[in-house]
Amino acid sequence: MELYDYNKLNLDQRAETLWKNGVFVINLREELYSYNLYTFFGYFVEVKLSNSENKIIDIRSFRKGEILNKYVDVIDINQMI
């Protein structure tokens, strides 16, 4: 599935598609939110979760950029590209 097509799906559809096809990479936990990073058809998908409500806040997909910066100190992103 191409990045553009994935981004056209609603939040529930993106989550379901990701659970079926994505490969979990890492979880980062902060005070208010947790972030799960997945690889998915040649790009990355980040799931933002509310720690207090235990629910998905947002799902963002990307190939590179600022979102990826918070993961580069924790894992070797180059091995996944």
Image (cartoon, helix red, strand yellow):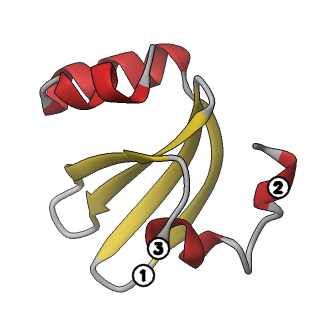
Which quarter of the picture shows residue 2? top left
Q: Residue at x 70, y 73 (%)?
A: 72
Which residue bears the numbered disc 3? 66
Please tell me which of labels 3 and 1 falls first in the chain: 1
Q: Is residue 37 above or below residue 2?
A: below
Q: Amino acid at mark 1?
A: Glu
Callout 3: 10 Å neighbours few (<14), some, many (20+)? few
Q: Is residue 30 left or right of residue 12?
A: right
Distance between the Cα atoms at labels 3 and 1? Answer: 17 Å
**Where residue 17 appears, x then y in whole percent?**
37, 17
Is the C-beta separation of discs 3 and 1 under 8 Å? no
Choose between 66 and 40: the one closer to the eye. 66
Query: Which image quadrant: the C terminus?
Result: top right
**Where residue 76 appears, x then y in whole percent?**
83, 63
**Where residue 51 appears, x then y in whole percent?**
28, 67
Q: Is residue 37 above or below residue 21?
A: below
Can residue 15 be seen here? The reply is no
Picture disc at residue 30: 1
Q: Amino acid at mark 3?
A: Glu
Distance between the Cα atoms at labels 1 and 2? Answer: 24 Å
Picture disc at residue 14: none
Which residue bears the numbered disc 2? 78
- Element carrying mark 1: loop
Please tell me which of labels 2 and 3 falls first in the chain: 3
Callout 1: 10 Å neighbours few (<14), some, many (20+)? few
Is label 3 or label 1 in front?
3
Q: Is residue 81 above or below residue 75?
A: above
Q: Residue at x 55, y 57 (%)?
A: 64
Query: Which image quadrant: the N terminus?
Result: top left
**Where residue 70 appears, x then y in whole percent?**
56, 77
